[in-house]
Amino acid sequence: MADSDAEDLVLTGVTKKFGTFKAVDDLDLTVPQGSFFALLGPSGCGKTTTLRMVAGLEELTAGAITLGPQDISYLKPYKRPVNTVFQSYALFPHMTIFENVAFGLRRQGKKDVKKQVEDMLELVELAQYGARKPTQLSGGQQQRVALARALINRPQVLLLDEPLGALDLKLRRAMQIELKRIQTEVGITFVHVTHDQEEAMTMADTVAVMNAGLIEQMGEPKELYEHPRTTFVANFLGQSNLIKAKVNGTDGDQIRAEIEGSTLRVPRDRAADDAAVRSGSVWVGIRPEKVFLAAGGTETSDGSNVLRRGRVTDVSFIGVSTQYLVRMPWGQELMVFEQNTGAREDFRVGDEVDLHWLPDHTFLLDADQDATAGVEREDLG
Amino acid sequence: MSTAAAPVGPAEAVAAPAPEERKRGWTGYLLLAPAMLWLLVFFIIPMVSLVSTSLYDPSGSLETGYSMTGHIANYVDTLSEYSKQFIRSIIYAGIATLACLLLGYPLAYAIAFKAGRWKNLMLVAVIAPFFTSFLIRTLSWQLILGDQAWVADILRGIGLLGEEGHLMATPLAVVTGITYNFLPFMVLPLYASLEKIDPRLHEAGADLYASPFTTFRKVTVPLSMPGVVAGTLLTFIPAAGDYINAQLLGNPQTTMIGNVIQNLFDGGSYPEAAALSVTLMAAIVVMVLVYINRAGTEELV
């Protein structure tokens, strides 16, 4: 407690192989003490394996895990100051809620557990359910029991393995807020594994996006969203329009990129990769909600990035926003989300439009990367 | 018209499900009928016949016929005469059940959690002995436990068995035979209940500071109790009434109550044999009820 980085969770060169398959590949990661850390990625990206290695339920193939000064790489799971909230909760079906929550304390030889268990059940708002069995509770309640059962041991790190995956959308939202509240209240390091980008961004201080056993990018949610450094992150976190472009020089601290005769400007510090910029071939990226539509030929290009002669091919009215698909002269369809503020002009299918946005919202990615990486997120549920 | 029609609608709606319910009721009874008939012919009628036989005058014989005199003394007489065999049966069956549990639990645990791709093969191996007759398998134990067999040789060699000692025709042989014959009845229900346990519960135990042994004691064992209860009942009940093992592997001092009943029936003493059978059945029912009550299975999911 005296030294703020004394109890950081540090993974160094952690590798896990199942046969010849590398589930986690030479992973380096530092989770600061007291932070709410999310490991985000599609199923099979190695995030759960990473979590299980921290819990001690999976043995490392190589590398080391340390918790503060202590090397826990090969410590038995029951000797680690780490507790897990399992995906399926794994509550003991033959014990009451009270006994489930008291389990960890009793195993550590604590005698007077009644007060602590009651306080913990209070914290998760299940005070009157102590005498029930897990099967008599709803999914959301079971989830909170699982949380209480782990938290009561005051672990140095709490691991959450897709804890909200089995809940319906409404309950999930409520539990996201609840989890964040509890984390702030108890101040324990939370490591949260999820495939739901919204869940990761709402709760976590720091998000690490994982793909194929590697960390693609790590940072604050806003930083990741506004400044993705790979096409995978650009597509997996929200949606992005990625347009193939040629770099044809710089203006001060702005890079000029050319797309089919239009010149776009991108601040140099929003280019993910200098090498890609020098090679000349890049993806110009822009989030759909950052793009504005204007009637064809009306938009002047004073300082903003403009792409002309698009044709609206699809309009979906969502309520808060309207989603447009616009086919560009080179055949690519771009997404545009317009807020329904009432101040914006509506367009219909077939209208000719100009797209414009601020250079500061543009980002550049390496054109060697797959533009569709991370897109299939919706299919995975 | 419309006002008159209105109340008819709901009335019809209420009346409509009635015939369907009746039909469903009939289907249920129809499906139950074969089982009921079976129970009547093979359980109720023999039970009535057995109980009434147990109350016949014991002075009758097959030739002269028996007269129904409500001779309750049959129960007292047989019980006092054969109490030794009665108690011996309970003890042998109890020891064999315990042995089955001690041997069967690790086996069932291994099949459920550790066997991996060998699981099905191991299950077949547990059931395979049933492909051979019960009698043949019991007789083969005479060879295994015989004075000239290697088991006895080794035991004599390491001094566990005296020069004049035997394995065959001893209580040990009888209990061994019973244990062997009823082991699958213990293993299969144990396996079924262990296999249902979510392996994540073991991980949760480990995660919550329980060593593997504590996890076993606090999580695995309580969750496998339905299997333990079913297995012990399936072993103990038939073992208590068994007579093959005592006859083939035992001696006159290891006679069990099953042998007594069989001998009495063979000798034509039907009322006594029936009285002993009823007593054995009643004793087992009482023991089972007490046991189930103690084990508290209804609390388990």
Image (cartoon, rainbow, N blue to C red):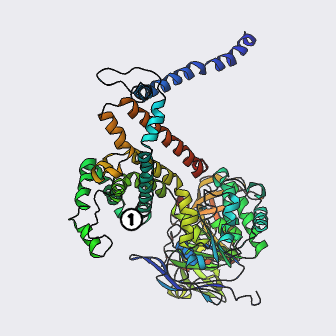
Residue B16, relative to residue B181: is it above or below? above
Residue B203's spot in the image, x, y percent?
A: 55, 68
Mark 1 belongs to which subunit?
A: B
What's the amino acid at mark 1? Gly
Residue A101, relative to residue A65: is it above or below? above
- In this rendering, position of residue B58 left or right of residue A223: left
Q: Residue at x 57, y 52 (%)?
A: B295
Residue B268's spot in the image, x, y percent?
A: 31, 30
> Outermost residue, left direction?
B148
Residue A164's spot in the image, x, y percent?
A: 64, 61
Q: Is residue B299 visible?
A: yes
Which quadrant holds the N terminus of chain A? bottom right
Query: Which quadrant of the structure image shows residue B3?
Result: top right
Return the residue nearer the eye: B10 or B276: B276
Q: Is residue A292 visible?
A: no
Secondary structure category for the residue under label 1: helix
Return the residue nearer the eye: B127 or B141: B141
Question: Residue at label 1?
Answer: B116
- In this rendering, position of residue A113 left or right of residue A11: right
